[in-house]
Image (spheres, rainbow, N blue to C red):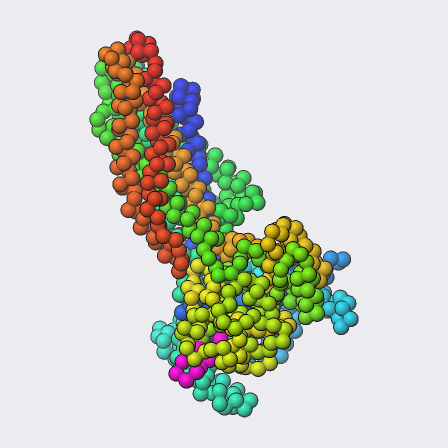
């Protein structure tokens, strides 16, 4: 081992720059591989950390949803019918806290002298015991005769009580009294459950009992997860029996309530519904259903795996070329040791071990680098996975084994080449690579350049799509809008005063409330009614007066809402085109507000109401709903030429004044887009790293190869110059080889890059085109860098005094 280390140190001193670049390239490649694989494992193992996840299924249906074929937003009657199904062990149903404003589900508690806020939801008796048996304290389910108390996760118990043994204690819930004074009410902790894993769609929040709320309400409000004893062999037959149970249950409820006229409509709707059950283990990559849970795209996962492997392949090629290029310069010393009695096998093993030591060293440096990266605040922009080495010890071991394999792969052929000559001949002669060795080196460099070109082209497409997300016309003045999610608990008077103060400010032109934001969600609430043979399904938003003006949405007919309006609707152009009977003055069923119908008062232009993942040219309604607590999104339009930062500051100050809180985020439209596309932007960031590393490794490889090429062709160049060759001719001799190689690499990379780019863009319902100029631009970038390095190195060699190189050789 001592001789191996001495040889490594000697070669590092002789070729300082090449050795340093090679070690850096390997280190960065291994670090990128670890970083990528943590994200891959996060996605592959999503929901797999949930206890008994193989028996858990997410209940979904196509009851009334619009943008997607199915939705996981389930009405309670659909879930309640599961009680009568013998195949079902239990089910968990809870209010989906992601549907409306996040503030709507935030509760305030008093902890000592401070107020703390936690997200809470309501669920059925077995909302938690269906999902886990890990009760750390007390009970994690209710009974029909005892539905008191709250159940909290271990993380909240530790934060609030300092211990998980909190069953029997109480949390002081804060609420406003009639005179505006803050009062407290003790909520008894019924039980504490072990936190669900971070890589899951289950929430570590406070759970209250739902009781009989919405027992017969068919609106979509809940998320239902079913635990089967044994999954039905004929799931279609199971679905038909379940639908019949739903109809029978609702028939009794409607008849008892005197709503016999609604029975036929509901029965028809249920019979036309498809119910499906998606395994929780596979739900992360399910894209036929709308869900508020996190999800990923299988194609992007495969691309990430391929990219992680490719970056190691590029670094390995670099390492191989480095070892192969230095081999001719080591032939004399190696064969001198053969003459002195060393065996060929021992010398080859020693040369291979040198490569293994270098590769393992680079791997250890990479792991140390990743350990430090986890402490960076921006680490979550690259991966959602846990970067701690202890959390991925199988990956660490795999990487060390991979490093050994990289060392063996990079060192085997160069070691065989360097020891393949008769010692007497090798000691007397100077050697370059054999024709076979040169062809192998050229093939590997071509592969390396192809990968780099592919990644640069692909990155160019992703960059254009990210710009497309921000710059596409949305149909409203999104660049001038500030949005804040305010507490639902503030009363209508405070909301009105807040809007009034904003509209009086010279920094704003108008302000209003809505129940959801535009442009950054994959789906809005949906309603359904019937008009003769037409089934009217439409997405909608609840808004207050002045909404269309505030958002800058173009009105085609009619007018914006006014405070004098009640039970009114503004529809988009797509609604009018689909249903020609809907005109200004038409009355549409809504089920919203004090009556179940509203009058159309205006038609607006089509807008992009959702993300680019969905098609936004479908019917969309804005429904007037002043004073509704669900309207928690405050939208304010910044005045032209107003200072944006000053406007943002005043916006925050007014929210603090009327809401009593100073930690409510104020976002621009772009801020919300970044949040909405966080998975896509994380993927783009990772791809950018891979593209950067690919080009960096290519640069390192070309520097090393051109340096070694010039080193063992110095005598040839000297003789050519003595024979009259000009500097330009010598430079041309070097560059012609690389030009041919670059063009061949581009021809290999172009088609795969196009296919992968198109595959990724198809993830979006609306996406940018793959522009032709990305291809020549990528060729110019990679080719220009490569030829620039070659020209620099060859120019330096061509300018040397030829007599010096001839004498030295």
Residue 232, placed above or below residue 745? below
Residue 656, placed above or below residue 4? below
Residue 332 location, x and y as percent? 30, 16
Residue 187 location, x and y as percent? 69, 68
Q: Quadrant of residue 19?
A: top left
| Front residue of 68 and 35 | 68
Residue drawn at (35%, 48%), measured in percent from left and top? 771
Residue 809, placed above or below residue 182? above
- Which corner quadrant holds the N terminus? top left
User: What segment carries the magenta color?
Assistant: 527-536
- The majority secondary structure of the magenta stretch comes to strand
Indicate left or right for 217 with 346 as reference.
right
| Front residue of 183 and 488 | 488
Residue drawn at (37%, 36%), measured in percent from left and top? 781
Indicate left or right for 30 with 550 as reference.
left
Residue drawn at (21%, 26%), measured in percent from left and top? 435
Indicate left or right for 197 with 696 as reference.
right
- Which corner quadrant holds the C terminus? top left
Residue drawn at (53%, 81%), measured in percent from left and top? 597
Q: Is residue 475 magenta?
A: no
Residue 370 location, x and y as percent? 50, 40
Figure disc tally: 0
Can residue 246 be seen here? The reply is yes
Q: Quadrant of residue 7?
A: top left
Residue 56 location, x and y as percent? 46, 67
Q: Is residue 535 magenta?
A: yes
| Front residue of 290 and 557 | 557
Can residue 109 be seen here? The reply is no
| Front residue of 557 and 207 | 557
């Amino acid at each position: 081992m001592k001789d191996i280390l001495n040889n490594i140190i000697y070669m590092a001193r002789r070729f300082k720059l090449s050795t340093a670049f090679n070690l850096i390239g390997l280190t960065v490649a291994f670090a990128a591989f670890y970083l990528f694989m943590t994200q891959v494992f996060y996605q592959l193992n999503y929901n797999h950390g949930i206890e008994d996840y193989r028996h858990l299924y997410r209940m979904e249906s196509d009851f009334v949803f619009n943008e997607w074929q199915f939705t996981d937003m389930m009405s309670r009657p659909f879930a309640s019918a599961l009680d009568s199904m013998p195949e079902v062990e239990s089910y968990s149903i809870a209010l989906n806290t992601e549907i409306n404003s996040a503030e709507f589900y935030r509760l305030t508690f008093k902890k000592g002298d401070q107020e703390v806020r936690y997200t809470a939801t309501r669920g059925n008796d077995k909302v938690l015991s269906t999902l886990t048996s890990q009760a750390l304290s007390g009970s994690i389910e209710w009974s029909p005769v005892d539905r008191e108390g709250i159940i909290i996760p271990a993380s909240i118990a530790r934060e609030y009580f300092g211990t998980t043994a909190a069953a029997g204690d109480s949390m002081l819930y804060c609420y406003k009294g009639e005179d505006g004074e803050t009062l407290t009410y003790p909520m008894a902790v019924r039980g504490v459950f072990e936190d669900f894993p971070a890589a899951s769609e289950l929430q570590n929040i406070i759970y209250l009992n739902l009781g009989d709320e919405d027992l017969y309400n068919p609106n979509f409000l809940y998320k239902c997860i079913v635990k089967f004893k044994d999954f039905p062999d004929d799931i279609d037959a199971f679905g038909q029996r379940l639908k019949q149970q739903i109809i029978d249950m609702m028939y009794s409820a409607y008849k008892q309530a005197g709503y016999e006229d609604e029975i036929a409509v509901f029965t028809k709707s249920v019979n036309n519904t498809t119910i499906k059950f998606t395994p929780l283990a596979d739900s992360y990559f399910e894209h036929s259903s709308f869900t508020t849970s996190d999800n990923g795209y299988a194609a992007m996962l495969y691309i990430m795996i391929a990219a992680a492997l490719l970056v190691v392949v590029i670094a390995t090629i670099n390492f191989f070329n480095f070892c192969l290029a230095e081999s001719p310069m080591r032939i004399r010393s190696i064969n001198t040791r053969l003459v002195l009695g060393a065996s060929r096998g021992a010398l080859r093993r020693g040369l291979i071990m040198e490569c293994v030591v270098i590769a393992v060293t680079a791997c250890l440096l990479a792991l140390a680098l990743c350990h430090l990266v986890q402490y960076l605040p921006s680490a979550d922009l690259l991966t959602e996975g846990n970067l701690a080495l202890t959390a991925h010890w199988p990956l660490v071991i795999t990487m060390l084994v991979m490093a050994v394999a990289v060392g063996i792969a990079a060192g085997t052929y160069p070691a065989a080449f360097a020891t393949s000559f008769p010692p007497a001949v090798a000691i007397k002669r100077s050697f370059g690579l054999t024709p076979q060795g040169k062809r192998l080196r050229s093939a590997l460099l071509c592969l390396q350049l192809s990968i780099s070109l592919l990644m640069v082209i692909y990155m160019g497409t992703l960059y254009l799509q990210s710009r497309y997300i921000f710059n596409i016309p949305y149909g409203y003045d999104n660049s001038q809008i500030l949005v804040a999610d305010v507490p639902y608990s503030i009363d209508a008077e405070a909301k009105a005063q807040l809007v009034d103060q904003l509209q009086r400010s010279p920094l704003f032109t108008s302000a209003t409330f809505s129940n959801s934001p535009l442009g950054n969600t994959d789906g809005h609430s949906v309603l359904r009614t019937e008009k003769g043979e037409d089934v009217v399904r439409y997405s909608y938003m609840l808004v207050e007066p002045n909404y269309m003006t505030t958002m800058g949405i173009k009105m085609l007919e009619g007018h914006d809402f006014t405070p004098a309006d009640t039970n009114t609707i503004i529809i988009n152009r797509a609604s009018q085109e689909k249903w020609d009977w809907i005109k200004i003055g038409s009355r549409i069923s809504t089920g919203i507000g004090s009556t179940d119908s509203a009058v159309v008062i205006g038609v607006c232009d089509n807008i992009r109401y959702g993300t680019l993942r969905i098609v936004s040219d479908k019917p969309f309604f804005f429904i007037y709903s002043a004073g509704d607590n669900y309207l928690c999104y405050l939208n304010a339009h910044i005045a032209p030429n107003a200072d944006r930062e000053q406007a943002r500051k005043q916006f925050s100050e007014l929210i603090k004044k009327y809401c009593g809180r100073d930690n409510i985020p104020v976002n621009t439209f772009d801020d919300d887009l970044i949040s909405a596309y966080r998975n896509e932007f994380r993927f783009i960031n990772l791809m950018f790293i891979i593209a950067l590393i690919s080009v960096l490794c290519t640069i390192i490889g070309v520097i090393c190869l051109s340096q070694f090429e010039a080193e063992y062709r110095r005598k040839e160049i000297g003789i050519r110059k003595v024979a009259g060759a000009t500097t330009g001719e010598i430079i041309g001799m070097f560059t012609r080889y690389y030009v041919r190689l670059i063009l061949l690499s581009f021809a290999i990379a172009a088609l795969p890059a196009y296919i992968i780019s198109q595959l990724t863009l198809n993830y979006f319902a609306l996406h940018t085109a793959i522009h032709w100029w990305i291809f020549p631009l990528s060729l110019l970038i990679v080719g220009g860098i490569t030829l620039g390095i070659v020209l620099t190195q060859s120019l330096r060699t061509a300018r040397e005094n030829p007599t010096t190189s001839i004498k030295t050789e």
